[in-house]
Image (cartoon, helix red, strand yellow):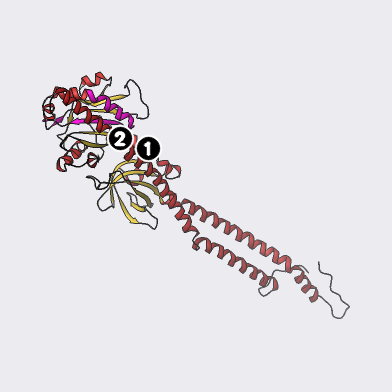
């Protein structure tokens, strides 16, 4: 008599159900430990820490460049101040006389143009300038030299151009004039284009007696003219012997050059991250966009010049950002840039570097682990269930055969049980 299908209360059914119950309990424990035992949380924390460390490293590099290289104008300022003292002594005039004589100002600017070029190249900036405040309230004389590629220098200065300054000075040092060249600085507008000169100058007028570095100012993006590249600027005033300002010096960094320093592809896989250099509001919840890198920025924020926090998260320095499309959560790691000395005039301007990434990319490792574990658990359960059924049937097959043989015994005849196989 052949092997019959297992009945509900049969030995094979009880054995199979017992073994399947053990398999289900083991699978449930493994799944529960994976989802609720802290593994996913730790993976998410690790992903957040990696983002934070990446932004910290980029912040450290940018902060060092801004604080140690670009805003360190002490040598530049010393050279200009020394040149002014020597020039006034040679001409036997005072500063007020020089300001009233345009020809004397041009002659002085010609004497310091090489120091300006040297400072531009030494700091690997994209521009350097000197402005002298004269009696004319609308236009100040000065020189503004631009270097579109600070990483390569040519001995003949042909890689430079003059944005502002007298033509004769440009000819004397072999610098071509830019397309938007002007002979002097127009300061009558009172907008962002004049802030690099007027803000440190006016701060020195109001707060006399402080160190020059106390008046250092990092500007918002501005353009010298309609043809010029957009840039940010660091500038400090020039002070006479009595601490009164008579001019301004500074360097600039074009936004295109800054974008090259913010490698957004290090934020997330497939270039799906973004960097934002911004200035925080007083509340710290809204940020004025200075420069951004990465195509993902437009996807998240469009052409907005301000971005805002939506809420805090459980991860240090990482916040949920408010975007134009709320279908996908976007996180920002925010790091403050220490680019001002403490207790200086403009230290209330809090510059920050923000690393932006979608939740999908930030927590991808955890999701991949969940997927792999889920697939592994399902495959293991199916294989285990098939194995349990096959093993159970193999184990009880002799018992079932024995039961069938006993049932078929004729008590009226001699009988014997067959040897189990």
Observer-nearest residue: 383 or 410?
Answer: 383
For marks 1 and 2 on the same chain, the one whose residue lies earlier in the sequence: 2
Observer-nearest residue: 397 or 161?
Answer: 161
Magenta part of the protein: which range?
A: 111-140
Image position, residue 64 (x, y; %):
35, 41
Observer-nearest residue: 272 or 159?
Answer: 159
Image position, residue 390 (x, y; %):
69, 63
Q: Residue furthest right?
A: 414
Quarter of the picture containing the N terminus is bottom right
Residue tagged by mark 2? 253
Whether tag 1 and tag 2 are in contact, CB under 8 A, the answer is: no
The mark found on residue 261 in the picture is 1
The mark found on residue 3 in the picture is none
Image position, residue 162 (x, y; %):
25, 25
Q: CA distance from mark 1 to mark 2?
A: 11 Å
Q: Is residue 115 magenta?
A: yes
Instruction: Decide if residue 268 is in sight here.
Output: yes
């Amino acid at each position: 008599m052949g092997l019959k299908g297992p009945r509900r209360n049969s030995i094979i059914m009880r054995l199979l159900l017992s073994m399947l119950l053990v398999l289900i309990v083991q699978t449930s424990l493994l799944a529960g430990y994976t989802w609720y035992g802290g593994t996913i949380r730790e993976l998410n924390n690790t992903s957040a820490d990696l983002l934070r460390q990446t932004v910290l490293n980029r912040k450290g590099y940018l902060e060092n460049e801004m604080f140690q290289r670009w805003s360190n104008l002490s040598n530049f300022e010393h050279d200009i101040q020394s040149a002014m003292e020597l020039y006034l002594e040679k001409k036997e005039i005072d500063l007020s006389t020089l300001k009233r004589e345009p020809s004397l100002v041009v002659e002085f600017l010609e004497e310091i143009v090489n120091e300006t070029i040297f400072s531009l190249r030494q700091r690997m900036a994209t521009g350097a300038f000197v402005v002298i405040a004269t009696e004319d309230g609308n236009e100040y004389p000065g020189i503004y030299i631009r270097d579109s590629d600070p990483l390569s220098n040519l001995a003949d200065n042909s890689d430079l151009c003059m944005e502002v300054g007298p033509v004769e000075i440009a000819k004397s040092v072999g610098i071509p004039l830019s397309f938007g060249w002007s002979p002097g600085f127009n300061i009558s507008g009172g907008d962002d284009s004049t802030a690099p000169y007027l803000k440190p100058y006016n701060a020195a007028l109001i707060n006399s007696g402080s160190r020059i570095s106390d008046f250092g100012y990092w500007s918002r993006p501005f353009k010298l003219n309609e043809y010029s590249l957009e840039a940010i600027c660091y500038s400090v005033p020039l002070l006479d012997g009595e601490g009164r300002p008579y001019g301004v010096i500074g360097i600039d960094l074009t936004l295109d050059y800054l974008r090259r320093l913010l490698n957004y592809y290090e934020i997330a896989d497939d270039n799906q991250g973004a960097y934002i250099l911004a200035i925080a509001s007083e509340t710290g919840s809204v940020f004025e966009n200075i420069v951004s890198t990465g195509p993902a920025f437009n996807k998240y924020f469009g052409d907005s010049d301000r971005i805002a926090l939506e809420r805090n998260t459980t991860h240090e320095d990482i916040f949920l950002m408010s975007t134009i499309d709320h279908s996908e959560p976007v996180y920002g790691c925010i790091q403050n840039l220490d680019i001002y000395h403490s207790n200086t005039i403009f230290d209330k301007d809090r510059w920050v570097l923000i690393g932006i990434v979608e939740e999908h990319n930030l927590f991808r490792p955890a999701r991949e682990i969940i997927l792999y574990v889920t697939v592994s658990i399902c495959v293991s359960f199916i294989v285990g269930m098939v194995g349990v059924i096959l093993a159970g049937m193999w184990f009880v097959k002799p018992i079932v055969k024995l039961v069938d043989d006993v049932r078929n015994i004729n008590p009226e005849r001699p009988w014997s049980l067959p040897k189990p196989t």
